[in-house]
Amino acid sequence: MAMNNLKHSLPPLPPIQGELMLDVYTHRSMLSKDIDENTVHGNTERLAELGNSVLSMLVVYTLYSEKPMLPAHDLKIRQSDILSDKNIGDWLSLYGLKAKIRCTDKSVLDRPEEARFLFNSYVGAVYTQKGLQEVMNWVGRLVNPSSEPPAVPGDTSNNQPAATPPPPPPTYYSQPPPPPPPSTAPPPMPSMPPPAPSQGVLAIFNQTCMQRGLTVEWKPEMTGPPHNPRWEVKCIVSGQHRGTGAGRNQKQAKEQAATEAYQYMQATGWGLL
């Protein structure tokens, strides 16, 4: 399929957030290979291994669900064709993922094994944050853009509600039925506190800097006319410039600057070089 046609048929890329996003967008050469027990994923090596298994399974299941049914041998051949090095590289380019990766030498991303590692890591991140059906909705349209992705077995969220079981047959008594037991109201359930909102990159960055004794200063600057301003915010960590963000409002630019600063500090071990 030509690149232009492939781009038009490409389904939207599911977003990922927070610290998981920062690790996926940082090349593994700049990250520690140690497992971090304080994170959901441990490290990107584990994330890529998970993503590889999920991606392979969902591609096969999408083909398995096609009508007329494909023979087992054809399932294997078509899975291999769909997950070829060329397709993986094309998907990365069309989604613009390569441009987002923080890496000392971006030419390494042209290597098939590095491109596959990045794509598998992203699939693993989507699965970790969104669940299997969300990955199925994405991968199913990568495999067959013209068909609705199949529902994950056992998941009724995309299907009709399960049928209500028929009522039990009536019980016949030789004597009048016994009176029903007195109803007792169940004890009230203890009230649960509302779940805490998920933290954005800015909040995670500020918290990490505070824990490590680093000072953070923000330097905003507005350019352009008042009715259409453009904001630029610089992030200064303990006196050193570590990130810059731009946007149509100060909040957006600050979040972008925090993301860039976090990636830099994460890659350098939070040291002040």
Image (cartoon, rainbow, N blue to C red):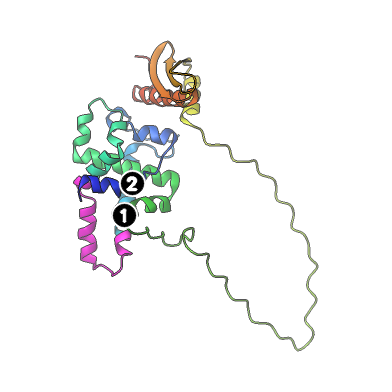
The location of residue 249, given as percent across then percent down, is 48, 24
- The part of the image, by quadrant, that contains residue 148 is bottom left
Q: In this view, does 72 lie above or below 1?
A: below
Q: Does the magenta stretch include residue 76?
A: yes
What residue is pinned by disc 1? 145
Say whether residue 110 is left or right of residue 262: left
Which of 150 and 249 lies nearest the eye of the viewer? Answer: 249
What residue is pinned by disc 2? 51
Amino acid carrying mark 2 in the image = Gly
Circle 2 Cα neighbour tier, 10 Å, few/some/many (<14 / 14–19 / ≥20): many
Which of 98 and 116 lies nearest the eye of the viewer? Answer: 98
Say whether residue 186 is left or right of residue 23: right
Q: Residue at x 71, y 86 (%)?
A: 172
Distance from Cα at disc 2 to Cα at disc 1? 21 Å
The location of residue 109, given as percent across then percent down, is 22, 34
- Label 2 or label 1, whichever lies nearer to me, is 1
Q: Is residue 16 above or below residue 181?
A: above
Question: Quick one: SS at disc 2?
Answer: helix
Circle 1 Cα neighbour tier, 10 Å, few/some/many (<14 / 14–19 / ≥20): some
Residue sitting at the far bottom: 174
For the stretch drawn in magenta, the main secondary structure is helix
